Amino acid sequence: MTHVTPAQKQAAQPLGTPGGSGKALYGGVTTRRVTVRDIAAAKARGEKWPMLTAYDALTASVFDEAGIPVMLVGDSMGNCHLGYETTVPVTMDEIALLSAAVVRGTKRALIVGDLPFGSYQEGPVQALRNATRLVKEAGVGAVKLEGGERSADQIDLLVRSGIPVMAHVGLTPQSVNAYGGYPVQGRGEEAAAQLLRDAKAVQDAGAFAVVLEVVPAELAAEVTRSLHIPTVGIGAGPDCDAQVLVWTDMAGMTGGRVPKFVKQYVDLRRALGDAARAFADEVVGGAYPTAEHSFH
Ligand code: KIV
């Protein structure tokens, strides 16, 4: 890891220092954007909080009005919004464009922009260049990147440069080609110990939160107890500090098979399909538009 002087550590500290408004993240802070200080304070209070992905201004505005305190403009936009098969092809231009839209559509949530595959693996300087772009061009309040020990140097430089970082360990979908699929992570003693090392490495590097994706619930609980930064679970059981879902999964838009950990709260795909068919039937049958929808 890059050497950090005490002064640099001190400068980085306010990002993760408990403080905030003392109000709940969900349903509490309403007059300004949620910050990483509010998130640190929620961990200190033992408060659980929700996070959803968002990829456009309109959907994000709905979640903002619903009180979702943190939104991730995830590279899951690849398979859930842009029609790619995986997250791997997603580019910085795509993330920057959609992050800016989500920021414009929201007033209150902390917006986290994802660093896509290939935008930070070369090293800390590349990570800083691309994270800076998301903060300056899109207006995000934080960035996320995948990897534990292997990404600690990148996290360290971003945090020292004033950019809050959400880390992501366990299943890291950008490595799909190396995994050959999306297997559960952290199974077995050695893998569990590595996951714990990864989580501690990103905390030590200055991350303000860490996503734990598809790991056994018992291990996620242990990681959550061991860290002073919040864990954000996705397929990681009930004991994480926060939970995140891809919005198109939780709203039933995705279609086809969704992972076991997804709970579908509404069947939006069916509702939208029904609405489209009703519109089409009325146009074809002459029932729409009527005088009510016409200008005279
Ligand atoms: O890209 C994404 O949506 C994510 C979440 C699943 C955490 O990384």
Image (cartoon, rainbow, N blue to C red):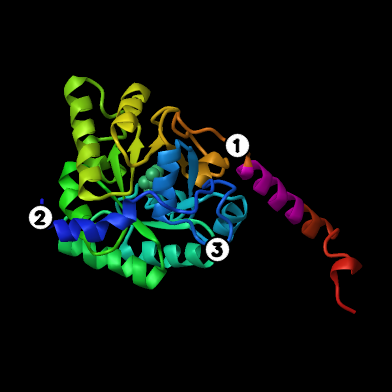
Q: Which disc number belongs to residue 83? A: none
The amino acid on which the numbered mark 3 sits, given as a three-letter code, is Lys
Q: Which residue is mark 3?
A: 107
What residue span does the magenta drawing correspond to?
Answer: 268-280
Q: Secondary structure at mark 1?
A: loop
Q: Which disc number belongs to residue 265? A: 1
Q: Which residue is mark 2?
A: 2
| Quarter-of-image position of residue 251 | top right
Tell me, yes or no, if residue 73 can be seen here: no
| Quarter-of-image position of residue 171 | top left
Tell me, yes or no, if residue 129 can be seen here: yes
Percent of width and height locating residue 32: 53, 62
Q: Earlier in the sequence, mark 1 or mark 2?
A: 2
The amino acid on which the numbered mark 1 sits, given as a three-letter code, is Tyr
Q: Secondary structure at mark 3?
A: loop
**Image position of 289 (left or right of 252):** right
> Magenta stretch: residue 278 in it?
yes
Q: Earlier in the sequence, mark 3 or mark 1?
A: 3
How packed mark 2 is, by other alpha carbons closer than 10 Å (few <14, some 14-19, many 20 or more), is few
Q: Secondary structure at mark 2?
A: loop
Disc 1 under 8 Å from ligand 1? The reply is no
